[in-house]
Amino acid sequence: MIKINLIPAEYIDKMNHKMMVAKVVLAAIVIVACVAFVSIWHATKATNLDALLVKRKVEIKYLQKDLEKVNAIEARISEVERYLSAIGQITKTRFIYTHFMQDLLVDLPETIWFTSIKTGLKGNVLDLSFALNSRSAYDLAYWVNLLESSEKYSEVEMGAFSIKKSDEGDTFTSPIKAKYTLK
């Protein structure tokens, strides 16, 4: 069967032209709708962000008062901590001489005696200078070794050593310097 097109070519061209215009108009409407949608979305987002900014500024103003209170409390806390630290430091070094004398005499042999003890306090460290006598060289060496091996004593130095002979026996005399730290 043969098909014969009885519609004139101008009519078909006109319909194709109308269809093309309709497609272009539809595409333009879709593009305008997309641009409008994106614009409305951005405008809404900007409005919401502005509202959030205003809300946060109000919160900041409200919290600024609390922040000032917190800073004042922290300042008071640090002042109290400094005060307690000063009291603790005073308390810590308050009995350093008592502890020092107890630690010094607990292991002191019977044959050793002091002619003088000089002390100087620097923080929680006691600078010591002893002048001592001993009837036994062994006890003197033992006691100096005990000081050197103790954690509480440091920088133990023994000065010039002299021996004095008498009817009662030999007397060993020596100065000793050390540092005592309360632990």
Image (cartoon, rainbow, N blue to C red):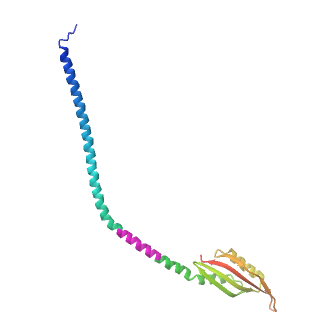
The quarter of the picture where the N terminus appears is top left
Image position of 87 with respect to 24: above or below: below
Query: Looking at the image, which is closer to me, 107 or 52?
Result: 52
Residue at the outermost top position:
1
Residue at 65 percent across and 78 percent down: it is: 179
Q: Residue at x 52, y 78 (%)?
A: 89
In the image, 95 versus 175, the foreground residue is 175
Q: Quadrant of the C terminus?
A: bottom right
Above/below status of 103 relative to 78: below
Q: Is residue 157 left or right of residue 56?
A: right
What percent of the width, then of the height, locates residue 53? Answer: 29, 56
Q: Residue visible at 28% across and 55% down?
A: 52
Q: Quadrant of the rendered structure where residue 169 is?
A: bottom right
Q: Nearer the viewer, residue 4 or 101?
A: 4
Residue 113 coordinates in the image, percent (x, y): 71, 87
Magenta stretch encompasses residue 74: yes
| Left or right: 85 as drawn, with respect to 170 | left
**Residue 24 in magenta?**
no
Q: Main secondary structure of the magenta part?
A: helix
Image quarter of residue 178: bottom right
Viewer can see residue 121: yes
Residue at 75%, 79% in the rendered image: 141
**22 relative to 178 in the view: left or right:** left
* Picture coordinates of residue 114, whole percent (x, y): 70, 87
What segment is highlighted magenta in the picture? Answer: 68-82
Give how far across and how far down residue 104 sits, in percent.
65, 82
